[in-house]
Image (cartoon, rainbow, N blue to C red):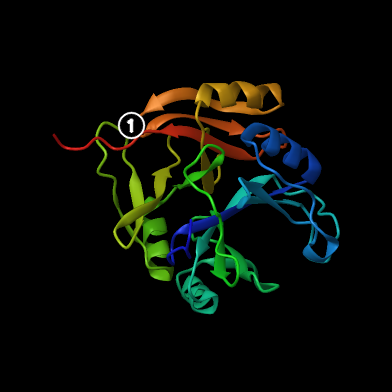
């Protein structure tokens, strides 16, 4: 990525976990990232890099005052959507029945952020860039390639995100797969959405990050050896071969070896 993300596109992901060092060890070992616990003035926030470019953040779960949460929230990856104006987006968000969980917060000169939930209950972040646009590498081994919303009400979610950001929601044009919705920005698919039907009962609405890998089976095996849980074993589907895993602290993520769409003859 050599420029800013368009408003409405996923631009960053980060992970909040009880044991930050253990998460750094796991993901750096799995994907070849480099990362260490950040300085106190940044709350210890780790910006993990790949080939010298930022790919994801990892932080220790804590309250805004620095205390340890009790009970501890579940470990989860947060997807951040880029916005040209955080204040305007938050105004639209509350008008559209979303709920602000945190922010807006200035992050030094890097940008401004907030965390919210959509009307269906899925949590997500918003990022207004300053000097930091977001992920510097995508679509390569060990880097983010896709973000997917699973929700119990796809119509409500589609209406919500289209109301707060310049995104459109439309059925996927891919053939041979289950019903799927794509979020598009300026005509380009930037994220996906599906129902909760094929997930275990009780799964809450959520945004799931996908990392591109050269070998899904190899990563699945390495992750399991490192203490991860296999939620959906490697399988072939219309977009490629993928698996869904949960890291040793329980945070779900997907890995995929994506294939290019077939071109008309």
In this view, the residue farthest toward the front is 51
Furthest residue in direction left, as rendered: 265
Q: Pinpoint residue 21: horizontal percent, then vertical percent.
A: 80, 42
> Residue visible at 49% across and 78% down?
88
**Could you say which quadrant of the image residue 51 lies in?**
top right
Q: Position of residue 89 (x, y in %)?
A: 49, 73
Question: Which image quarter is the C terminus in?
Answer: top left
Report the front residue among 214 and 243. 214
| Placement of 246 over or under 69, stated as above or below | above
Is residue 19 visible from the viewing direction of this image?
A: no
213 shown above or below 191:
above
Residue located at (51% from left, 25% from top)? 215
- In x, y percent, where is residue 137? 53, 50
Question: Measured from the top left, where is residue 62 in percent x and y?
Answer: 79, 56
Q: How many marks?
A: 1
In which quarter of the view is residue 163 placed? bottom left
Q: Residue at x 71, y 35 (%)?
A: 26
Q: Secondary structure at mark 1?
A: loop
Q: Is residue 132 left or right of residue 176?
A: right
Q: Residue at x 79, y 56 (%)?
A: 38
256 vs 248, left or right, is: left
Q: Residues within 10 Å of mark 1 (few under 14, many from 20)?
A: some
Quick check: can you spot residue 52? yes
Return the residue at label 1.
238
């Amino acid at each position: 990525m050599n420029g800013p993300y368009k408003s409405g596109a996923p631009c960053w992901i980060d992970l909040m976990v009880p044991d930050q060092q253990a998460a750094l060890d796991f993901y750096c070992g799995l994907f070849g990232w480099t990362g260490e616990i950040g300085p106190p003035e940044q709350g210890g926030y780790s910006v993990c890099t790949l080939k010298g470019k930022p790919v994801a953040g990892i932080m220790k779960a804590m309250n805004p005052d620095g205390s340890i949460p009790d009970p501890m929230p579940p470990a989860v990856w947060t997807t951040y959507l880029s916005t040209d104006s955080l204040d305007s987006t938050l105004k639209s968000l509350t008008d559209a029945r979303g709920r602000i969980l945190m922010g807006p917060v200035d992050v030094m000169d890097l940008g401004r952020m907030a965390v919210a939930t959509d009307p269906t209950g899925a949590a997500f972040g918003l990022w207004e860039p300053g000097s930091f646009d977001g992920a510097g590498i995508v679509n390569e081994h060990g880097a983010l390639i896709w973000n997917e919303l699973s929700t119990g009400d796809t119509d409500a979610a589609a209406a919500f995100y289209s109301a707060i950001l310049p995104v459109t929601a439309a059925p996927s044009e891919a053939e041979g797969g289950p019903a799927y919705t794509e979020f598009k920005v300026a005509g380009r698919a930037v994220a996906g959405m599906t129902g909760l039907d094929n997930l275990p009962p009780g799964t809450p609405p959520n945004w799931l990050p996908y990392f591109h890998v050269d070998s899904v089976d190899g990563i699945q095996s390495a992750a399991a050896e490192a203490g991860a849980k296999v939620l959906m074993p490697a399988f072939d589907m219309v977009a490629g071969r993928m698996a869904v895993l949960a890291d040793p602290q329980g945070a779900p993520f997907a890995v995929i070896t994506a294939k290019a769409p077939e071109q008309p003859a």
